């Protein structure tokens, strides 16, 4: 690194000392890029309701169903996994597909019948069907 580059980096650190915290993205040429933390990304997720169930649909192409993890605790649904990029590359010209760990959290608007939850993975979409819990009637004697 020559003196000009050192001076530019020093100027950036003086002018933008909190930039990493504010933006979460690197300023080209800045030194804090190496310390950047990688967070789990969130795939596109639709949540909708039908007459008898809640449906969560996640767009997550390039996975095997065994790579996906689904957890339901009360009314909180978590879908997670890791999408691997297995192809060897010399370099990227453009990179928009996200790889690595992902998580999608959904707070369901009502109680579900946890024993009847079903999940399918086809054509790059994970669809989780969560039947609504039936009201429990108490018999009065």
Image: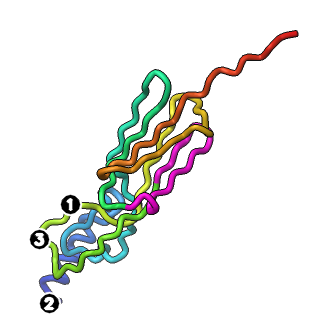
Q: Disc 2 on helix, strand or loop?
A: loop
Residue range highlighted in magenta: 64-79
Q: Name the residue that disc number 2 marks.
A: 2
Whether residues under marks 3 and 1 lie with C-beta atoms below 8 angstroms apart, the answer is: no
10 Å crowding of disc 3: few (<14), some (14-19), many (20+)? few
Q: Disc 3 on helix, strand or loop?
A: loop
Is 118 covered by the magenta stretch? no
Residue 81, image x and y in percent? 44, 60
Which image quadrant for residue 85? bottom left
Which image quadrant for residue 110? top right
Q: Disc 1 on helix, strand or loop?
A: loop
Quadrant placement of the C terminus: top right
User: 4 or 128: nearer the eye?
Assistant: 128
Q: Is residue 135 above or below residue 115?
A: above
Residue 15, image x and y in percent? 24, 65
10 Å crowding of disc 1: few (<14), some (14-19), many (20+)? few
Q: Name the residue that disc number 3 marks.
A: 93
Q: Name the residue that disc number 1 marks.
A: 96
């Amino acid at each position: 690194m020559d003196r000009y580059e050192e001076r530019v980096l020093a100027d950036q650190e003086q002018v933008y000392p909190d930039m990493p915290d504010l933006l979460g993205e690197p300023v080209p040429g800045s030194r804090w890029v190496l310390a950047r933390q990688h967070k789990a990304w969130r795939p596109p997720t639709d949540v909708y309701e039908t007459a008898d169930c809640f449906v969560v649909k996640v767009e997550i192409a390039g996975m095997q169903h065994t790579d996906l993890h689904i957890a339901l605790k009360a009314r909180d649904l978590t879908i997670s996994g890791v999408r691997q990029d297995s192809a060897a590359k010399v370099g990227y010209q453009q990179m928009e597909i996200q790889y690595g760990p992902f998580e999608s959290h959904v707070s369901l608007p009502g109680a579900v019948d946890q024993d009847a939850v079903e999940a399918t993975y086809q054509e790059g979409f994970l669809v989780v069907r969560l039947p609504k819990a039936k009201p429990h009637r108490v018999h009065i004697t």
